[in-house]
Image (cartoon, rainbow, N blue to C red):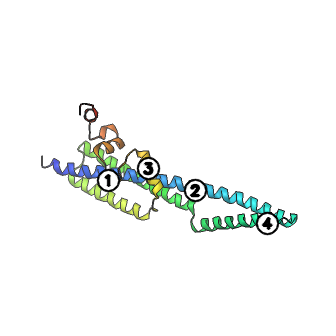
Amino acid sequence: MDTDFPIEKLESQIRELYGRVVWTHKTQEKCADIILKQHVKIKIAQIVLSAITTTGVLVAVFGNNQTIGVITAILSAILFGLNTYTKDYDLGEIAQKHTAAAVDLWNVREKYLSLLTDLSIKKVSVDEIIEKRDHLQNELFNIYNGAPRSINKAYLEATKGLKSNEEMTFTDIEIDSLLPKELRKVKQNEAQQSNSPEN
């Protein structure tokens, strides 16, 4: 019994870490999607404003129309603002950094999943578990250290995508919903019993 106890504690911690990485991975993916959409919208706006401004300048100069000249000046100022914003904040590059972080997190997520599999078939010793866990923690530290900060909207979309309401804590059932059936802690019949009307 004493030999199983540390492994159970380690398994519990690794399951929690796995859940957090799943969540963070999904959040980074959503960040990349949101920022890339903003990037595309701004690029389209820049093209449209450039075309309208150029046409407006030609009409104002050759047509001698003051109203079009004023409208063109306003649109030109908006275009200048967008160009300045995209010069200071390269949204395409930021989206790429979120994508790179998501890819790195996916790799760590899969390593946690493999470690949980090894635990379930009793393939690793306590010392090996601790060594692998610590190594993965260092990998995560390096990924988080280089990853861009996520945005709230992405977190909300990740929450919706993963169908959970809790931020950083997971019940066994919630983690089980993210794991393959063979690695679930709460067996299916136990989950059905707990959801039955008699309980």
Q: Which residue is mark 3?
A: 158
Is 172 placed left or right of 60 in the picture? left
Q: Earlier in the sequence, mark 4 or mark 2?
A: 2
- Tell me which residue sits at (26%, 41%) in the image: 185
Query: At numbered mark 3, what does the secondary structure look like: helix, strand or loop?
Result: helix
Give the distance between the C-alpha atoms of the residues marked 3 and 1, in whole angstroms.
17 Å
Query: At numbered mark 4, what does the secondary structure look like: helix, strand or loop?
Result: helix
Label 1 Cα neighbours within 10 Å, binned few <14 / some 14-19 / many ≥20: many
Amino acid type indicated by mark 1: Leu
Give the distance between the C-alpha atoms of the residues marked 4 and 1, in whole angstroms.
60 Å
Residue 20 place in picture, x, y as percent: 35, 53
Q: Which residue is mark 1?
A: 17
Amino acid type indicated by mark 3: Ala
43 and 81: which is toward the camera: 81
Of badges 3 and 1, nearer the viewer stands 3
Is 178 placed left or right of 86 in the picture? left
Query: At numbered mark 1, what does the secondary structure look like: helix, strand or loop?
Result: helix
Q: Which mark is residue 83?
A: none
Amino acid type indicated by mark 4: Gly
- Tell me which residue sits at (52%, 58%) in the image: 96
* Rendered position, 15 above or below 64: above
Whether label 2 touches label 3, CB < 8 Å: no
Q: Earlier in the sequence, mark 4 or mark 1?
A: 1
Label 2 Cα neighbours within 10 Å, binned few <14 / some 14-19 / many ≥20: some
Q: Which residue is mark 2?
A: 38
